[in-house]
């Protein structure tokens, strides 16, 4: 009897305690401005899955072509990466305005020149393929005239010139051929902005001499194909060395 009374009293106390504190549901449902106002509270309670899920990145396989094979359109040639063999000559050179490029690069150059012309711009190929023997003669002449130190700055060593791949060209236009002023011409600016659409990149950008080994050459373009050229542009990568994770090549080793 006494036990029942105690139990009843305890139950009564518990009920009283519950009813005295406001039910949590009532508090939440009440149109209290202080509870509804803070947007941070709403933000933290709402899960933001679309914001944290990154958009699907198009995957680009950086190993799909060789960067060592001198016949690859992705071959990377710099002062630390000569052509192998040194006297390599491409087998598919074709004429372009009295000069030569590999067939694929020549077609891409014709397409780029035509697209520029449609914009009222006149691009011309000033230099393109240069053979190992040509480079030997040029380098020798420069050494004879200016000494070896100066020659190394002005002319690539035989076997180390991108022109020997048949995938590089020096273009001119806007009254400026193979000079830094090309960067300020409408032609030079168009090439920098639209070259990638045709597979060409400005290979020696401004301020990258520590990586490429060459001062800014706005006129020197390199054919790498549209997929790689547009990927470089999309990712804002300025040099092939950086894109492929290669060591910087500011000068010749040794
Ligand atoms: Zn050049």
Image (spheres, rainbow, N blue to C red):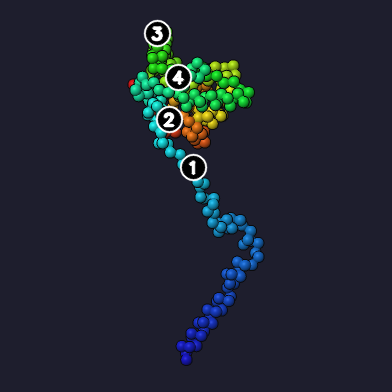
Q: Earlier in the sequence, mark 3 or mark 2?
A: 2
* Residue under the point 41% across and 17% down: 131
On screen, residue 188 above or below 151: below
Q: Residues within 10 Å of mark 1 (few under 14, many from 20)?
A: few
C-alpha span from label 3 to label 4: 24 Å
C-alpha span from label 1 to label 2: 20 Å
**Element at label 4:** loop
Label 3 or label 4, whichever lies nearer to me, is 4
C-alpha span from label 2 to label 4: 16 Å
Q: Which residue is mark 3?
A: 144
Q: Earlier in the sequence, mark 2 or mark 4?
A: 2
Where does residue 40 sit, x and y in percent of width and height? Answer: 58, 55
Q: Residues within 10 Å of mark 3 (few under 14, many from 20)?
A: few
Instruction: Pick the residue in front: 4 or 110.
Output: 110
On screen, residue 173 above or below 142: below
Residue 205 can be seen, yes or no = no
C-alpha span from label 1 to label 4: 34 Å
Whether the residues at callouts 2 and 4 have beta carbons within 8 Å, the answer is: no
Q: Which residue is mark 4?
A: 129
- Ligand 1 within 8 A of label 1's CB? no
């Amino acid at each position: 009897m006494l036990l029942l009374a105690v139990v009843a009293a305890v139950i009564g106390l518990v009920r009283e305690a519950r009813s005295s504190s406001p039910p949590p549901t009532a508090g939440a449902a009440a149109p209290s401005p202080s509870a509804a106002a803070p947007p941070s509270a709403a933000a933290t309670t709402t899960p933001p899955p679309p914001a944290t899920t990154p958009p699907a990145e198009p995957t680009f396989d950086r190993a799909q072509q060789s960067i060592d094979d001198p016949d690859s359109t992705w071959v990377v040639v710099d002062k630390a990466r000569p052509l192998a063999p040194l006297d390599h000559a491409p087998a598919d050179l074709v004429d372009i305005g009295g000069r030569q490029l590999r067939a694929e690069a020549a077609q891409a150059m014709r397409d780029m020149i035509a697209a520029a012309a449609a914009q009222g711009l006149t691009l011309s190929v000033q230099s393109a393929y240069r053979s190992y023997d040509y480079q030997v003669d040029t380098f020798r002449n420069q050494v004879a005239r200016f000494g070896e130190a100066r020659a190394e700055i002005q002319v690539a060593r035989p076997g180390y010139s991108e022109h020997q791949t048949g995938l590089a060209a020096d273009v001119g236009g806007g009254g400026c051929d193979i000079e830094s002023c090309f960067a300020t011409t409408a032609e030079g600016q168009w090439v920098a902005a639209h070259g990638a659409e045709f597979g060409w990149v400005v290979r020696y950008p401004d301020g990258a001499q520590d990586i490429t080994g060459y001062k800014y050459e706005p006129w020197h373009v390199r054919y790498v194909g549209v997929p790689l050229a547009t990927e470089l542009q999309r990712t804002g990568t300025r040099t092939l060395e950086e894109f492929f994770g290669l060591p910087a090549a500011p000068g010749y080793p040794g």
